[in-house]
Amino acid sequence: MANRNAARRAARSAKKLHPLTLILALVFLAAGVAGGIFLSRRLTQNDRFDLNGAAVVRLEVGEQFSDEMATVVSFGRDISSKVTVGGDALNVEEEGIYQLVYTVDDLRWGDYQRVRVVIVGDPEGAEDYANG
């Protein structure tokens, strides 16, 4: 019986937090969050996902297209070799507006994509891309 009473008292006193313990826990939590944000920004400060060359390319029907691809830096490493191109199947023999979609399988850039518009000939709607 005495052991049970002692165990109950010990359990009750263990449940009570000293105010200093709570303050220290909050200080350490805030320091950890701030340190994590700082470290994340330092690790990714030079990261980029950019198209090489123009975002809008104009070609004559039958003109050759040389894709300059994209440059991707993730956590300070160049991973441009991981870039994949999807979107429309480019046919330089047929007038049209084609979109090439560049993506990379990477933790940092997982949901990002870049799009290059290739205009072959003078199709309807080409004037919407006057800046290219």
Image: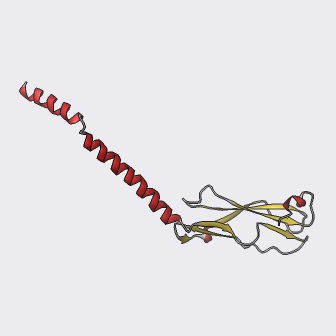
Coloration mode: secondary structure
Determine whether, in the image, residue 53 is placed left or right of residue 107: right
Front-most of residues 93 and 102: 102
Determine whether, in the image, residue 31 is placed left or right of residue 46: left
> How far across and down, in percent of the image, does residue 49 sit?
63, 65
Count up the numbered dots: 0
Locate residue 72: give its quadrant.
bottom right
- For the N terminus, the image quarter is top left
* Image vertical order of residue 100 relative to residue 4, above or below: below
> How far across and down, in percent of the image, does residue 112 sit?
64, 57
Q: Identify the residue at horizontal 76%, vertical 70% (top origin).
A: 54
* Image vertical order of residue 52 relative to residue 8, above or below: below
* Image vertical order of residue 11 relative to residue 116, above or below: above
Q: Identify the residue at horizontal 37%, vertical 49% (top origin).
A: 29
> How far across and down, in percent of the image, does residue 115 sit?
73, 61
- For the C terminus, the image quarter is bottom right
> How far across and down, in percent of the image, does residue 117 sit?
79, 63
Front-most of residues 84 and 123: 123
Q: Identify the residue at horizontal 81%, vertical 73% (top origin).
A: 65
